[in-house]
Image (spheres, helix red, strand yellow):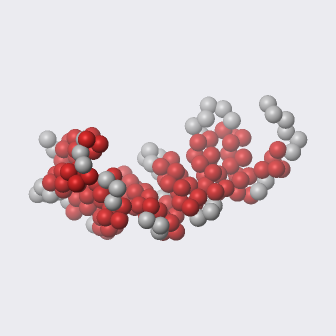
Amino acid sequence: MNLHEELDVAWQELESLSPGEFVARITKIVGSPGVPDEIREFQLACAHDSTGSPELAIPGYRRALEAGLSGYENRRAKIQLASSLRNIGQVRESVRILMAESTTEGDGLDDAVVVFLALALTDLGQEREAVSRLVHALADHLPRYTASAHRYADALNTDQAATLLEGEEDR
């Protein structure tokens, strides 16, 4: 089995192992010779995060990014780092990271960025902006009402919701 297959098997067993057993399993897998530092740090951070230890995950995500983690895993690390920071109360840093990632990449993680950014914005008392971002993200998935959803989402940030409703009847 190669590294990715071993990791896939381990992650499938996450729920059946204790947190300590799971972290030990990931540690053993990524401790193999030839595993790049950035992959080792990222996987260990993910293991700590997934077993309820965001304070242990944060330094690992940072080390993975500093070591040159790239591509899809780079973006995952930033999202997960931001989520962990939010979980320990460092919400403003979480928002800064997620705002930098809020460009459309088309990598399947765009909606995840929006979700975690919305949670962080809510923690900062920015509920209207959070809902606006969520509605924008969902709007393109709707079979109908896309344009209306985008307009209403925009209105949340500009306090124009009442204006949009003037003269409209329920349809």
> Which quadrant of the structure image shows residue 47?
bottom left
> Which quadrant of the structure image shows residue 48?
bottom left
Q: Residue drawn at (71%, 53%), measured in percent from left and top?
A: 156
Percent coordinates x, y for residue 153 in the rendering = 68, 49
Q: Quarter holding the C terminus?
A: top right
Number of numbered discs on residues = 0
Position of residue 163 in the picture relative to residue 77 (left or right): right
Q: Residue drawn at (47%, 46%), measured in percent from left and top?
A: 106
Residue nearest the observer in this picture, 125 or 96: 125
Q: Residue drawn at (47%, 68%), measured in percent from left and top?
A: 90
Q: Is residue 11 visible to the viewer in this orientation of the structure?
A: no
Q: Is residue 119 visible to the viewer in this orientation of the structure?
A: yes
Percent coordinates x, y for residue 16 in the rendering = 25, 41
Above/below status of 79 relative to 106 = below
Percent coordinates x, y for residue 12 in the rendering = 27, 40
Q: Residue drawn at (74%, 52%), measured in percent from left and top?
A: 155
Percent coordinates x, y for residue 40 in the rendering = 22, 58
Residue nearest the observer in this picture, 70 or 25: 25
Q: Quarter holding the N terminus?
A: top left
Residue found farthest to the left: 33
Position of residue 35 in the picture relative to residue 135 (left or right): left
Above/below status of 23 relative to 66 = above
Above/below status of 66 relative to 158 = below
Position of residue 165 in the picture relative to residue 43 (left or right): right
Above/below status of 96 relative to 165 = below
